Image (spheres, rainbow, N blue to C red):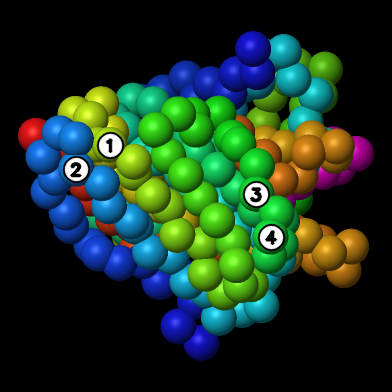
Amino acid sequence: NAGVTQTPKFQVLKTGQSMTLQCAQDMNHEYMSWYRQDPGMGLRLIHYSVGAGITDQGEVPNGYNVSRSTTEDFPLRLLSAAPSQTSVYFCASSFISPGSSSYEQYFGPGTRLTVT
Amino acid sequence: SQKIEQNSEALNIQEGKTATLTCNYTNYSPAYLQWYRQDPGRGPVFLLLIRENEKEKRKERLKVTFDTTLKQSLFHITASQPADSATYLCACFSSGSARQLTFGSGTQLTVLP
């Protein structure tokens, strides 16, 4: 199993540009989520999904869109990049079925995004 | 608003000693609390989960306690080693919203040889 994969690893954008951060998992997890991590702020939830076709907002959703057309993929779209979106972005996945006792989140390696 | 605080940004301890990290929560009644380890340039890795009706959970050299009266969890690493040096994150979620984890900002632990 590859686990959770994210592409790209690094990205530099100019203000106003748009892009999509890719996330894929091969563990058949129902739950997928996107976080951003900033110094001193911890991980903050952007959007999450509990299954294909179902998405919801987290703590900091503004400026980001998501969709979940398959169980495996959960892309994050930046509509019009701003310097405030400079951050490290992590995708995570987990089971949420009753048989899962730990709700262990599996994280990807992260995407380091700089917006100039 | 719900808040998770890890009250030490950095902790240095000597090899062989027990490291104790603290996680406090406010405006919150989490049903579950998790601890993660994060190494520089990598995503967090799950270590342990403890439920609100559990006082203590152990895994090898790791021990987690959960005090719902104090609204606090303590994370202990016994016989610490330099390889334990990392940032440790606590995260909580409620039983009604297992989909929304709230993370603390982490404690950077350095174990000195």
Horizontal relation, residue B91 to residue B98: left or right: left
Task: Say what amino acid the circle numbered 4 marks.
Answer: Gly
Q: Position of residue B23 (x, y in %)?
A: 58, 27
Tag 1: amino acid: Ser
Q: Classify mark 1: helix, strand or loop.
A: loop
- Front residue (pair A105, A8): A8
Residue B28 lies, with reference to residue B98, above or below; the image says above
Residue at point 65% right, 49% down? A55
Q: CA distance from mark 1 to mark 2?
A: 5 Å
Answer left or right for B39 relative to A28: left
Residue A80 badge: 1
> Which element carries disc 3, helix, strand or loop?
strand
Could you say where residue B11 lies in the image, as x and y percent from the top left?
A: 35, 31
Residue B77 visible in the displayed image: no
Write down the quadrant of residue A5 in the picture.
bottom left
Q: Chain of mark 4?
A: A
Part of the protein shown in magenta: B49-54
Along the line of sight, which residue is nearer the eye, B22 or B113?
B22
Residue identified by numbered label 3: A55
Residue A58 vs B35, above or below: the answer is above
Q: Picture quarter containing residue B112?
A: top left
Badge nearest the viewer, 3 or 2: 2
Q: Disc 1 is attached to a residue of which chain?
A: A
Whole-number angstrom distance, CA of label 1 to CA of label 3? 20 Å
